[in-house]
Amino acid sequence: MHTYEHSVLLDPDKCTGCTTCLRHCPTEAIRIKDGHAVINDARCIDCGECIRMCPHKAKRAVCSSLQNMGRFKWKIALPAPALYGQFDNLEDIDYVLDGLLKIGFDDVYEVAKAAELVSAYTRLYLKTDGVKKPVISSACPVVVRLIGLRFPSLADNIIHMLPPMEVAAGLAKERALKQHPELSDEDIGVCFISPCPAKVSYVKNGFADYKSRVDEVVSISEIYFMLISEMKLDANIKSLSESGMLGIGWARSGGEATAIFNQDYLAADGIDNVIKVLDQIENGNIPPLEFIELNACTGGCVGGVMTIQNPFISKSRLVSLRRFLPVSQNFLSKEESEYIPESYLFDELPEYHPISRLSDSMAESMRMMADIQKIKGNLPGIDCGACGAPSCRAFAEDIVKGTARLSDCVFNNPKRKGEG
Ligand code: SF4
Ligand code: SF4
């Protein structure tokens, strides 16, 4: 079985076992063992909630360093649109793009440009017969993985469109090969400047058999400090940006959905809200909708844990910045609008392993479920977390799976109760 490579890691030396992260993990991936948090790789969706919540900074996001790009002859930066929201008084995106060239990139391909193309093809996708509605965006890798683990019945609703970062990587490499025929494929390196660890994991693992075309992922926080020392006000700055309001809008919640030009959409952000919406779709408890945009981070990508700025400030900066931009610089021609090119689509969704599945055998699963119910009935039901599990139900499941003992519960341990 393919093991998933994660980008959220724990520093055991800093962890005090305080249980804060345990209570906030949306997939119950964390347990406290021997006084430290332990992450279950099969359940973790790299949402970064534990990084946000840990009062001791014991969890961190792991990504590449810019130095890793040194192995390529031609280095291309793919800035996420959330990068533009990090700077005070930014009036022109070209200052950021020019700064990227000054810190050593040979070319820049805006993810916002690819986002405008993805939006255009999403409009076409929604008109295709047989597409299961509501269509759910595939742009947030946390949401795609969450659906696989907790809502597998909604997997067919996920749009089979590659996320803008991936489309940008392909188009950037194509452009480099065209403009520089002396280069080979291996000479060209593409580096995504990311707001969140989930995109790092996406690049490491790809989608099912699909291998990402991005070579390295660095954090917005790393690039930010290099950029501010290079960005200078210059009246003669070269025009570099090739995106408009629609593409930049993808950085915040609602931006992708408004770019489909259809009123029947819903956009939700923040992992708890995302789970509520997915619950409602699964229960058939939402009005008929065409499109659903879900972002695990509050505010959308501007709220990623690898950004610098408060997401609400970033959002308001992007609103001011967008006022000076054209609607889009990437509308499709009549010929381009006839069908969606293969390079924008993926065929298969990953093989899912729903966390609710206890065993591959139905009989075994039912027996385990009955045992969980029985054990749970004898637990206090107050979800105190003292056993190291996030809830009494999760603790009962751990006992049935053999990873915890009933005596780990303070209410069922005679010694801890002072009876022994
Ligand atoms: S929040 Fe989690 S990782 Fe941080 S100290 Fe507490 S138990 Fe450890
Ligand atoms: S990154 Fe998210 S899913 Fe993974 S352990 Fe942390 S809170 Fe849980």
Image: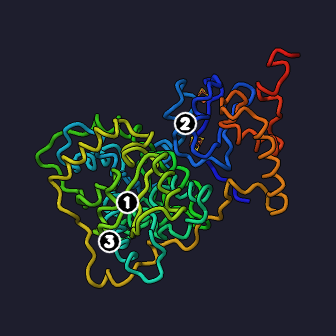
Quadrant the C terminus occupies: top right
Mark 2 Cβ and ligand 2 under 8 Å apart: yes
Q: Residue at x 63, y 50 (%)?
A: 5
Callout 2: helix, strand or loop?
helix
Q: Callout 1, which amino acid?
A: Leu
Q: Callout 3, which amino acid?
A: Ala
Between 215 and 89, the one lying in front of the other is 89
Mark 1 Cβ and ligand 2 under 8 Å apart: no
Q: Residue furthest right?
A: 420
Callout 1: helix, strand or loop?
strand
Disc 3 packing (10 Å; few <14; some 14–19; many ≥20): many
Q: Which residue is mark 2?
A: 50
Whole-Å distance between the Cαs marked 2 and 3?
Answer: 35 Å
- Residue 210, image x, y percentages: 57, 67
- Residue 331, image x, y percentages: 25, 72
Count of marks overlaid on the render? 3
Q: Residue at x 65, y 43 (%)?
A: 29
Q: Which residue is mark 3?
A: 120
Whole-Å distance between the Cαs marked 3 and 1?
Answer: 18 Å
**Disc on res. 266:** 1
Quadrant the N terminus occupies: bottom right
Q: Callout 2, which amino acid?
A: Cys
- Residue 357, image x, y percentages: 72, 57
Between 37 and 330, the one lying in front of the other is 37
Q: Residue at x 14, y 53 (%)?
A: 324
Disc 1 packing (10 Å; few <14; some 14–19; many ≥20): some
- Residue 80, image x, y percentages: 37, 51
